[in-house]
Image: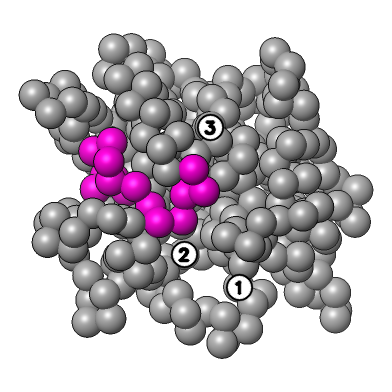
Amino acid sequence: MKLYSIETGNFKLDGGAMFGVVPKQLWEKTNPADSKNRIDMSARSLLIEDGKKLILVDAGLGDKQSEKFFSHYSRWGNTSLIRSLDSLGFSPNDITDVFFTHLHFDHCGGATKREGGKIVPVFKNARFFCSKIHWEWATVSPNPREKASFLKENLLPLKDSGQLNLYSSDESGFCSDLDLDLILVDGHTEKMALPKIKYKGKKILFASDLVPTSGHIPVPYLMGYDVRPLVTMEEKSTILKDCVDKDMVLFMQHDPINEIVVLKKTEKGVGFDTGTTLNEFF
């Protein structure tokens, strides 16, 4: 097995929204804001090369939305999903499977593109995996709080393609087809799935939006986007303690600097120890 960090493109989000009730004078120590109170965000995916499988975990924002849409998120840098794959010698057609942690636009938008007046999958030979419960949460009757993050143009083309595979997240071994162990959490959104991977003698947890940046490691540091913030606190507390106890590191999806974060126990609970890149850590 080989793992690759895939930079799909960077963007900015309001720092207050990203840290909820935490005062700016605290969160700005780790996540400095610009003149519009926005903090830098990565949209990092993980590529897993395992035998004949090439599995992409999440797909970033993509680029099919309008300039008006992207003006709210101030994309920065010159990375993209396709350029990152190309730099490793891969093409979109090489991807066999795409696994979505959840369906907010910054995690699945890059899986589709505009082509000939239609929106079609970027990965024509891939199967797309998502929790059945989360898919219904996002598409059947999305709640007003999240509706703006579940975009029909990101989701319906996946279903129309015939490449969508919905797994039953209430059964054991629910995603055994990809040989991924998953932790399901419900604080950020219903049935967000966090892959756990064994790699070179280490355990890695794909942190997704449970811990979007290293600045969010303290349990009370929650995003204003979480639909069940108290549940997120319970989930973070349990999972981060488990990471320390089992020597498991975090793969950070939105941290603009750290790809891998090592945790440690402190007097105040679990805290940040060191951060680095995937290649440097392994």
Circle 2 is placed at which residue position?
A: 9
Q: Position of residue 240 (x, y in %)?
A: 33, 26
Residue kind at label 3, given as amino acid type? Val
Circle 1 is placed at which residue position?
A: 63
Position of residue 170 relative to residue 277, above or below, is above
Residue kind at label 1, given as amino acid type? Asp
Of the image marks 1 and 2, the number of the one nearer the N terminus: 2
Please tell me whether mark 3 or mark 1 is closer to you in this view: 3
Q: Which residues are magenta?
A: 213-228
Residue at 81% in and 52% down: 140
Residue at 74% in and 37% down: 133
Q: Position of residue 95 (x, y in %)?
A: 69, 44
Please tell me whether mark 2 or mark 3 is closer to you in this view: 3
Q: Position of residue 88 (x, y in %)?
A: 51, 49
- Whether 101 is among the magenta residues is no
Q: Are marks 1 and 2 in contact (CB under 8 Å)?
A: yes
Q: Is residue 172 left or right of residue 41?
A: right
